[in-house]
Amino acid sequence: MPTITKNGKAPVKTAKLQQFIAGKWRDGTGKRRVSSTSPTDSRIVLAEGPGGCKEDALAAIAAAYAAFPAWKATPAPARARVLDKVVKLARERKEELGRILAQEEGKILPEALGELEKGINLLEWYAGEGLRFMGDTAPSELPKNLLFTIREPLGPVSIITPWNFPWAIPCWKMAPALVAGNTVVFKPASNTPLLAQELVKLFEEAGLPAGVLNIVVGAGSEIGDVLVEDERIQAVSFTGSNEIGVRVHTICGKRGIKVTCEMGGKNPAIVWDDADLDLALAGVLKGAFGSTGQRCTATSRLIVQEKVYDEFVGKVVDAAKKMKLGDPLDASTNMGPAVDEGQLEVDLQAIATAKKEGARLLCGGERPMKDGLQHGWFVEPTVFDQVTPTMNLWKEEVFGPVLAVVRVKTYEEAVKAANDTRFGLTCAFYTQDITLAMRYVEDAEVGMVHINSPTIGGEAQVPFGGVKGSGVGDREMAKDGINFFSKPKTVFLDYTGQKRTSNIY
Ligand code: NAD
């Protein structure tokens, strides 16, 4: 375990980053080093080591390939018991892992602990699925003929994850993959490798056999391409940007293997004139500025009915101005930094473009440069109104704490505005009118609808994912995760013991 003891002001011992291949931790053989630096204070290096490269990715695939037959043959309940042990270990170390998450990714500690718990819930839920890894039986057209299906794993699979949920997303992919009997090569995002390494260590400690789970840390495209193109890989589960997701999907399509890509969002929250405005305010603030806006499910567009527009938008702006930026480990901090310099630049560029295109800046918009914040990648919570559908801020995902607000009069206008996007991940509708709420449930072009709750969140037992440009392939979580990582085999068992006269086949 790395000894990251305190916040940015205290000395931090740099942890070592390595690759875990065929059950052994070893240095990457790439030319470039990989490092994890604190987004709160970029002078602090949390972890570093020699980076993985193409050869390491190939070695990891070979290990997963070799380990597959024995893991497939391990009974599903026994596979699930490894997950049970990981749950126990993760619960024991939750506080310590949450601190690593907050320091490495930058979300505030309560949010980091929430993410830890969510990942643990997912591991727990899928451990239960080990006892339910079953097929179906069906009545046959013929007498004395049993039709049934069994489920089988796919083989070695690749899991490629982003930095914004460095614990929960790997958990929600690994858990169904492993319990269904696949072996895994895991590539975490290059800027959050430390927590990914800690997660793999928990599986090692829980007794997962060598080669069943491997991790390669290094440059995204070099390793990513190998993990998608190698003919031994039988499926890819990817979460990240649209640009890379579409590329991954295309390659897998050509190869004819299963692929699921969860990608970006431009999620709207509608606040209707009869809404409980305090409830809506809490939800919009959490959705827009929680985790520094770095959620695929973040609220990035706010659509407000004109009767409550001035009052509600005023409340949002007042609250945003009061938010305290700072160290994610400090209990008084409301919002942490952007994950790295590149993301900060994306945020600032989106703000500059919105100004240029004529949106009205209501608050924020700056990078704070005093009180120690200048050492990190901070950006103020930002609200624009007078945003039009042709503006970049309306169309493109920022992945930062930047909210675009529009005023509407009718329900039809609100739905048109909400659906006016190439994305379709999630949305929220605040109203007291259940009839209107259910009408919106039907009209929303998304994978997930929230009524009177923020656009964010998901639970292990229900599918997670989007439509349009937000996702292709099977949904994740719930049974959908197991279905993605397994395939049915149909069995026709004829027990007549004699030749049939029927010509039904
Ligand atoms: P990204 O697309 O830059 O990277 C995602 C992963 O792909 C990383 O591990 C990266 O190293 C890897 N990668 C890079 N090049 C690759 C290649 N050529 N082949 C294969 N893999 C490659 O995304 P990011 O910046 O880490 O994350 C932010 C994005 O993720 C946002 O767009 C966000 O909306 C999205 N996201 C979506 C969901 C969802 O469930 N829909 C959840 C979280 C994040």
Image (tube, helix red, strand yellow):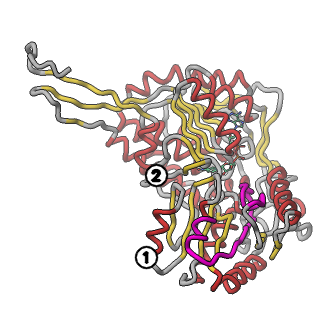
Where is residue 354 drawn, in percent x and y? 83, 63
In the image, 425 versus 122, the foreground residue is: 425
Q: Quadrant of the C terminus?
A: top left
Please state if 291 lies on the left or on the right of 419 as rendered: right
At 40% from the left edge and 41% from the top edge, which residue is drawn?
A: 81
Pointer 1 local density, CA inside 10 Å: few below 14, some 14–19, many at least 20: few
Tell me the amino acid under the disc marked 2: Pro
Where is residue 366 drawn, in percent x and y? 87, 67
Q: Is residue 98 above or below residue 491?
A: below
Indicate whether residue 404 is drawn in magenta.
yes
Q: Is residue 214 above or below residue 494?
A: below
Q: Nearer the viewer, mark 2 or mark 1?
A: 1
Quadrant for residue 368, please give it: bottom right
- What residue range appears in magenta? 390-417
The residue carrying mark 2 is 463
The residue carrying mark 1 is 434
Residue 401 visible in this rendered orientation of the protein: yes
